Amino acid sequence: MGLKAYLNDIVEAVVTTAKGMRITARYGVDPKEEVTLQYPEERWEIPKGYRGFLHNDIKTCTACNMCVKVCPIDCISLESVRGADKKMVLCSYDINIGRCMYCGLCVEVCPVNSLLHTSGYEMASVALGELILHFIAAEDAPEIKARVARQVAEAAVKAAAQAAAKAAEVPSSGTAEAAKVAEAAKAEAAKAPVVEPKAAMEEAPQAPVSEPTVAKEGEKKE
Ligand code: SF4
Ligand code: SF4
């Protein structure tokens, strides 16, 4: 290396150092140039469309099971029973946000838009089981099932009474037909208290809230 090149290197080193120090000094003294966010007192504004924690409005959810089927990694589980009006009634709905990869497929397929991404992203735990959101408390499930079974039984009894009344209106010439209708009504009444639990959850959730909550420690570990 010649003397000229050597001196050029020294000059270049001094100039680049000065440039860097000028930028450092500007960020150090000018408050407008601050880039550090004082988290958690300050937070970035969440952009529109951000896919944060999931929330299910269980009053709107129809328990159609589509979100459960579409999830590629089985984060969602639900249990439902068929109601008196033949519609499914939710008994439990859980989302494992520790496993969720926030792909948004479940939100896309939800036909009633009850399942949505929120802007939430902060949750820490020492047990993975605590990252399961329970949208219906575990202790509420038996009560819901019992209520639905009662409604189904009442509807069946009502239908049987209507069928029997109809049978009584049949003219005497059709005695055999009337007996048939009465028999059918009886059979319907006998079937009344049957419900159809549709288990999609291997393990019952434990958190005691109707809003999404986290499971108690040690309830479900992976
Ligand atoms: S966002 Fe994706 S991974 Fe998470 S629950 Fe929905 S479908 Fe499953
Ligand atoms: S897809 Fe929507 S309506 Fe169907 S079970 Fe899931 S959250 Fe409920």
Image: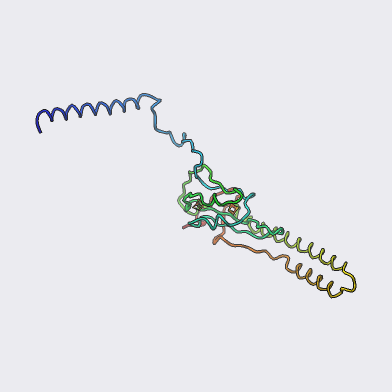
Q: Position of residue 2 (x, y in %)?
A: 9, 31
Q: How many marks?
A: 0
* 33 relative to 143, above or below: above
Q: Nearer the viewer, residue 63 or 210?
A: 63
Q: Nearer the viewer, residue 220 or 53?
A: 53
Residue at 72% of width from left, 61% of height from top?
152
Q: Position of residue 175 (x, y in %)?
A: 87, 74
Q: Nearer the viewer, residue 175 or 159?
A: 175
Q: Nearer the viewer, residue 50 or 216?
A: 50
Q: Position of residue 60 (x, y in %)?
A: 64, 49
Quadrant placement of the N terminus: top left
Residue at 48% of width from left, 52% of height from top?
100
Name the residue at the right extreme: 172
* 74 relative to 121, above or below: below
Relative placement, left or right, of 54 versus 36 is right
* 26 relative to 69, above or below: above
